Amino acid sequence: MFYDKIKGMNTSTTRSITYNGDRIEYELTIKRVKNMNMRITKDGVIHVSANAYVPDYRVDKFVIENMPFIERARYKIDALNAKRVDALQYVNGESLSILGIPVTLRLVEQDGKPHIGFDGKAILTMVVPRGTTFEAKHKLMQSYWRNLGEKVFVHWAKVVYQRYHKQGIDVPMPTIKQQRMKSRWGSCTPAKQLIKMNTRLLEGPQAYIEYVMIHEFAHFKYLDHSKNFHNLVAQFLPDWKARKKSLNVYFAHRP
């Protein structure tokens, strides 16, 4: 193991630990450093550097001991992300994407209850009273995303659950929650039978949602990203690597 680390000097691997029932991932880089070091990047990813002499269990312990710091850092990152100016200004003709479909926003100002309707093809209609503030329009849009997520994410959870059981793989039907996350597309907490999905996934093609859901279900069997874990994902999605790459490229330049 030590010689493998020496050969892999200055390369990174993804490791995971369990903390308060949650699976926490971090990037470990083997370097010629005296002490273990940690940094949290602006995307919320945990990066740890250690020398080749430090056993993996000690690095895991180091991360666990620093979880209060990590949680504070991620809280600040999420707070800043939540305050960002939304890309939409909620005016006629703006463009957005819903489940990978290019959509044009149509704003209708008229009396009545505010609501949003999507024709499933190319037009998203937002109906609001005249003089409605940007904040009220934004709140209405966020409600639309939440309602869409409740339908789409639960649908894919049921589909993936059935696929696993058809293959004789015992996994629970999890509670599905959605959250805008900066550093992860999804997360799985086996102890709580819970899967969280990043609401941003609703902007992209459903093929990405399928991949993330299958990935998170696999964590009910394997907490880490071991060979067995990836073999299980590949059993359901032989093209998972291509989908993962496509997913990251798709969102790389989106606001």
Image: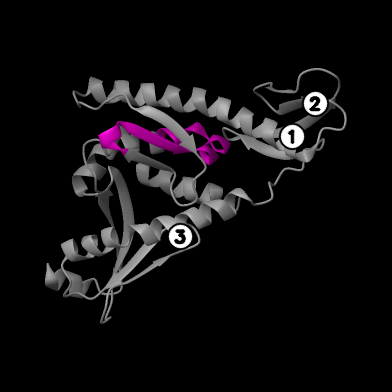
Mark 1 vs mark 3: which is more N-terminal?
3
Q: Amino acid at mark 1?
A: Ala
Disc 2 designates what residue? Answer: 128
Tell which of 168 and 33 is nearer to you: 33
Disc 1 designates what residue? Answer: 136
Please tell me in which quadrant of the rendered image residue 13 appears: bottom left
Residue at x-position 31% and y-position 24%: 173
Q: Is residue 130 left or right of residue 139?
A: right
Question: Which label sits in the foreground, 2 or 3?
Answer: 3
Q: Position of residue 60 (x, y in %)?
A: 23, 60
Tell which of 20 and 96 is nearer to you: 20
Dot 2 and dot 1 residues touching (CB under 8 Å): yes
* Distance of label 2 from label 1 (alpha carbons): 9 Å
Query: Which span of residues is magenta-colored?
Result: 189-211
Q: What is the secondary structure assignment of the residue under circle 3?
A: helix
Q: Is residue 225 left or right of residue 42?
A: left
Quarter placement of the N terminus: bottom left
Q: Position of residue 3 (x, y in %)?
A: 13, 73
**Magenta region includes residue 248:** no
Question: Which label sits in the foreground, 2 or 1?
Answer: 1
